[in-house]
Image: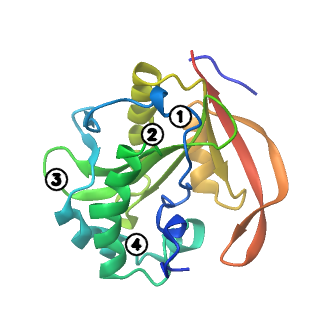
């Protein structure tokens, strides 16, 4: 690959955040794939659209303090949060060309392992941000790295996007390690660029260019 250096209270934009990513509008929705969202697999993992039955495991996974520390899931995370996300917000985002929010499951057993998603960056033609997380019991097993790899391959094959980004809090070493394993390059660190639960923090900007 080519490389280079509050809860939902009548505010839908909060709901559209994918666990580290943010809902964004495509500048040119004609460039977003038509039809239903895909299912991607490497034989071990399955990256697929959210289903209503996923709400049960999603609400359990999102109780994890590390997910709430590093991502923008609502905190506390409730049954209603999970149901609304998987049945309304995720499918609507795809239908309206505002990105793809996908579940990551075990291809053999169907067990929920985490989430991955891609959302276009507003005002930057051909640029999108990827977000991800893994369930606590499946970390350090390559789940996120492999899921991101599947998503990147699909992106180059199915969209006109030219640049992918990861926005990582530098203190989140596990997320930074995923970026490196997936071939992203650190472009630099933006001081006080992010705000998470009222706290400002630096953002490490990683990028990957279309091969």
Q: Is residue 200 above or below residue 19?
A: below
Q: Residues within 10 Å of mark 1 (few under 14, many from 20)?
A: some
Q: Nearer the viewer, residue 9 or 179?
A: 9
Label 4 vs 1, first from the N-terminus? 4
Q: Which residue is mark 2?
A: 148
- Pointer 4 residue: 62
Q: Secondary structure at mark 4?
A: loop
> Which residue is under mark 1?
182
Asked if residue 197 lies left or right of residue 161, the reply is right
- Residue contact at pointers 4 and 1, CB within 8 angstroms: no
Q: Residue furthest left?
A: 109
- Residue 85 in picture, x, y percent from top left: 35, 65
The residue shown at (51%, 61%) is: 17
Assign a secondary structure to mark 2: helix
Q: Position of residue 80 (x, y in %)?
A: 32, 80
How far separated are the C-alphas under marks 4 and 1? 24 Å
Number of marks drawn = 4
Tell me how far mark 4 sits from mark 3, CA to CA. Answer: 18 Å
Return the disc, 4 or 3, that comes first in the chain's sequence.
4
Question: Who comes first in sequence, dot 2 or dot 3?
Answer: 3
Q: Which residue is mark 3?
A: 110
* Tag nearer the camera, 2 or 1: 2
Q: Earlier in the sequence, mark 1 or mark 3?
A: 3
Secondary element under disc 1, as helix, strand or loop, is loop
For label 2, the crowd category at 10 Å Cα-Cα, with few meaning under 14, some 14 to 19 and many 20 or more, is many
Q: Horizontal and vertical percent for residue 1?
A: 56, 17
- The reply, left or right, for residue 2 in relation to residue 95 is right
């Amino acid at each position: 690959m080519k490389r280079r250096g509050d809860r939902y209270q009548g505010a839908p934009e909060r709901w559209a955040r994918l666990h580290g990513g943010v809902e964004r509008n495509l500048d040119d929705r004609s460039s977003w794939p038509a039809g239903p969202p895909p299912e991607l697999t490497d034989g071990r993992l399955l990256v697929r659209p959210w289903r209503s039955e996923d709400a049960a495991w999603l609400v359990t996974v999102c109780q994890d303090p590390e997910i709430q520390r590093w991502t923008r899931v609502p905190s506390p995370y409730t049954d209603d949060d999970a149901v609304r996300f998987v049945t309304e917000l995720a499918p609507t985002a795809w239908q309206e060309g505002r990105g793809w929010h996908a579940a990551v499951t075990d291809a053999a057993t169907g067990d929920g392992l985490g989430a991955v998603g891609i959302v276009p960056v507003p005002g930057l033609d051909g640029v999108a941000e990827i977000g991800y997380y893994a369930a606590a019991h499946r970390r350090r097993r390559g789940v996120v790295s492999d899921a991101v790899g599947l998503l990147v391959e699909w992106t180059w094959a199915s969209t006109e996007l030219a640049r992918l980004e990861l926005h990582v809090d530098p203190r989140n070493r596990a997320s930074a390690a995923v970026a490196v394993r997936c071939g992203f390059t650190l472009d630099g660190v933006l001081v006080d660029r992010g705000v998470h639960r009222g706290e400002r923090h630096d953002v490490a900007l990683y990028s990957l260019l279309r091969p």
